[in-house]
Amino acid sequence: MPKNILIDYKNVNFSYKKIQTLFDINITIKKGDSIAIVGHNGAGKTTLIKLLIGILQPSSGTIHSIEYAQTNKLGFMPEHSALYNHLSGIELMHYFAKLKSVDFGSIDGILKLVEIDFAANKKILHYSKGMKQRLMFAQALLSDPEILILDEPYSGLDPNSRRLFSQILQKLSAKGKSIILSSHTLEGLADIVDNVVFIKKGRVALSGEIKTIIDDLDLDDKIKLALDKESSADEIIKSVQHLITSYTLFNNKLTLFYKTTNNIEILKTITNIASIQDIDINKANINDAYYHIYDKL
Amino acid sequence: MTPNPILTICLREIKNTINNYYLLGMVLLLAILSLSLVLLGNTSFGSTGADNLSMQITSLSSLSIFFIPLMALFLSYDSIVGESEQGSLLLMLSYPIKRYQFILGKFFANWISLSIAIVLGYSSTLLLLSFDNNLTIKFVYASLGLISASILLGGIFTAIALLVSVIVVQRSTAIIYCIAIWLFFVIFFDMLLLITLTSKYSHIISTDMLSNILLFNPIDIFRIISIGEQGNNLLPLYSLSNIVVFPQFILTSSMLIWIIAPLTGAIYLLKGKDL
């Protein structure tokens, strides 16, 4: 196995009690990769995560990986986890640090990083859901792991915590840590991860670098226009008809879909139209790729 | 030095039992019940012909038979299934911990907590009884026998509860299983045995066979160990122990096997558990 490869799954299948839940999974994760496993609820994301953390073993297929499962090289944050409510945040971190044989010295810094240091001596019983999520994130960072696996890390998070998690993950990714996270929402993922694995009904529907996927799918960019009156939509559509692939009109809001190469031309054409009150330009993103794939498969 | 995961988990769980007031509750329950039983027992000797000590130890043994399995089962029934339901089992097993270490950490924590409750709970009563019995060798031996056998009994039902906790997928199912197990061993097993022995089919069970059958119920082994000679002239049920010819080490070994077997089963089944 090449040195830069951390995990290499070839034709991996998983069955439990004769029910197959994962089919023919092929994934390669290189050192420093950041990957999102995306799919609907029940698609098989969590089962794949359990395989990746070494809790489950595949029924068939080949796995080549560095030895990271159940070692300090792995940091894992589960989707749901009740914590010892009678402990304070710092006591819980001490407990986890002992189990990982990690020096207590690093704990304060980690709690500060996830911005839960102010409640370190408070009992977990009195933590909000967001605070508990931060503490779970903190325990995953103990031992400065090479591979960070997060199962639905954004589930139930408030926008501030979401932004904080993203910032930390971006920093860790920049440091060369490998990040694997699962999510059923795609919002903001492109800022954190470079690669995506779409899972549908236990199969990898599509995987690869986000930018490449979007380019390969040849998805349309879009401009959303807010008009002062619906009648002016006809004028706009007429003027850009040769540049767009499609459009939608609803409640004085016109959306034009077009190929990226026509971007400037369209803008030049529509900026002179007086009835436009607001313009919102959206490049094709991971969200569009997701829906495009799910619609087709 | 790297801390042992079994010790780390065990200490954490014991602290949890203390913080949740489970330990205090168990100590108080055993102390109050044992004191009440002994004080009330002193007034009702009747004409059984039993001496004071026999009656007192037998009363305390009955208390152990009913309450210690119950306390052990309730302390441990959700040790694994509870963590599994809450999602923390997945997290714990992603740590550098072997599954057997996790089970053993839980087992020792609950067994130690229960043992502390037994020692503290019975101490007050035995102290009171020591005045009545003038602290004779016989009394000390009987008291130590009762406490150590009760601790072993607690260990057995802690191990059984852990096995149940690994097998089931819901906490509520674990409670039902544990109650059924308690009813079977504490009530139905001896009841069925007595019915058979007093029926027309009693000849199919020889004395030797009966002795061996009793080893299949940890409650009966406990009864034989703790009551021993005190039971000879007491209630008819206890007189079952008269026919047993096993030496003490066989009985103690049987109790240890009753701890090891379900514990091994729990460790084995946790390996294949769907998490």
Image (cartoon, helix red, strand yellow):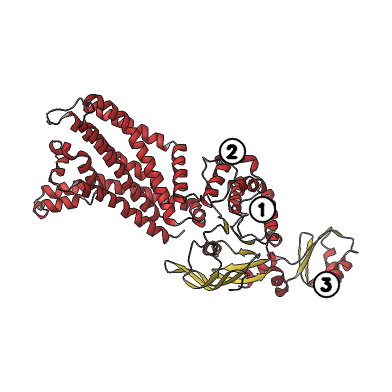
Q: Chain of mark 1?
A: A
Q: Position of residue A166 (x, y in %)?
A: 68, 55
Q: Quadrant of residue B230?
A: top left
**Front residue (pair B92, B146):** B146
Q: Position of residue A78 (x, y in %)?
A: 55, 55
- Residue at the disc numbered 1: A165
**Front residue (pair A242, A39):** A39
Judge from the rendering whether residue B35 lies leftward or rightward of residue A6; answer left or right: left
Q: Are marks 2 and 3 in contact (CB under 8 Å)?
A: no
Residue drawn at point x = 12 percent, y = 30 percent: B49
Q: Residues within 10 Å of mark 1 (few under 14, many from 20)?
A: many
- Residue at the disc numbered 3: A262
The relative height of residue B227 versus residue A40 in the rendered view (above or below) is above
Q: Position of residue A26 (x, y in %)?
A: 57, 73
Q: Quadrant of residue A215?
A: bottom right
Three-letter code for the amino acid on which mark 1 is drawn: Phe
The relative height of residue B233 versus residue B40 in the rendered view (above or below) is below
Q: Residues within 10 Å of mark 3 (few under 14, many from 20)?
A: some
Three-letter code for the amino acid on which mark 2 is drawn: Lys
Earlier-in-chain disc, 3 versus 1: 1
Q: Residues within 10 Å of mark 2 (few under 14, many from 20)?
A: some
- Residue at the disc numbered 2: A122
Which one is in front in this view, the residue at disc 2 or the one at disc 3? 2
Q: Chain of mark 2?
A: A
Q: Chain of mark 3?
A: A
